[in-house]
Image (tube, rainbow, N blue to C red):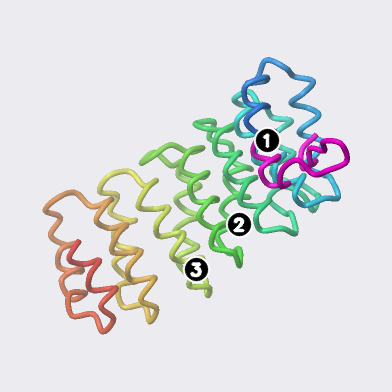
Amino acid sequence: MLGQTVQVAGVEACPKWLCDLATHKRLREQCNGRNPALVREVCEQVRDQDASVRLNAARSLGSIAQHGDMEIIETLLGCDSSYGLNDASSSVRAAAAESLGEIARGCKLERASAMLLARFGDPDWTVRSSALNALVRISGPNCAEEWLLDRLLESLNNESWSCVTEAAEALGRLAPKDDKRVVQSLTNLFSHPDWAVRKSCATAVSRVAELGNRNALAAILPLLDDADWRGGKEALA
């Protein structure tokens, strides 16, 4: 089904990637949660040997699976397997994360959130970005549960700058407004040696801190003289 090329009289009718897009569109039109057998068939293809088939299957499930379908969610999480979020292909991992965000939107699933959080350390930035967006969809903006806030705050101490930046951005989108613990933890990193971390923390503080928060303003002002213009620019924003 997915990943196959249309043939006409033994001649390839159109490129494989175009066929994949057409198949994806057709699946959305024909299924949309009303054909469980087809959804399960696509779900099985997340474990196909062909990476392009796995990619299109992971991508399609976000459009055709029913909201909260735990079997699909478990498959995309790749629990105890090398598929879904654990796929060798970064494109498949990113697609799995995106679909998880759609299928589990607002479900506040702890295991799904924890596994997406683990992807903040992924070497591919598209996977990290997709995991962040999915985590926000599953938890809901500005209403993260306490355990998740704790995990994100712990991640601010990670040795990987990319993991810290994703955690900071997640806190900016998930933390309750003017959460003093979150604001303090973020401002503590304004002196971090990596400009990307300083930038992400400044952005997060601007989202979490209430307008006129004097402590936040006092911490942000020194960033105006940041040695890297990218960090200073975020302070001005």
The amino acid sitting under disc 2 is Ala
Placement of 140 over or under 208, stated as above or below:
above
Rendered image: mark on residue 73: 1
Q: Where 104 sits versus 173, above or below?
A: above
Contact flag, marks 1 and 3 (Cβ < 8 Å): no
Q: Which residue is mark 2?
A: 118
CA distance separating discs 2 and 1: 16 Å
Other-residue count near label 3 (Cα within 10 Å), few / some / many at <14 / 14–19 / ≥20:
many
| Label whose residue precedes the other's in the sequence (1 or 3) | 1
- Left or right position of 226 against 155: left
Q: Amino acid at mark 3?
A: Ser
Q: Nearer the viewer, residue 136 or 176?
A: 136
Left/right of residue 126 with respect to residue 156 in the rendered view = right
Q: Position of residue 41 (x, y in %)?
A: 81, 29
Q: Nearer the viewer, mark 2 or mark 1?
A: 1
The residue closer to the viewer here, 94 or 51, is 51
Task: Give the labeled residue for mark 3.
Answer: 162
Q: Quadrant of the C terminus?
A: bottom left
Q: Which residues are magenta?
A: 1-23
Outermost residue toward the top in this view:
34
In the rendered image, the vertical position of residue 59 relative to residue 235, given as above or below: above
What's the residue at 43%, 65% (across, down)? 165
Left or right: residue 226 versus residue 195 is: left
Element type at mark 3: helix
Question: How many marks are shown on the rendered structure?
Answer: 3
Sequence-wise, which precedes: disc 2 or disc 3? 2
Asked whether disc 2 touches disc 1, contact meaning CB atoms under 8 Å apart, the reply is: no
Give me the C-alpha separation between circle 2 and circle 3: 12 Å
**Which residue appears at 25% of the width and 66% of the height?**
234
Q: What's the distance in space between the residues labelled 1 and 3, CA to CA?
A: 26 Å
Question: Residue shown at 35%/76% (left/top)?
Answer: 195
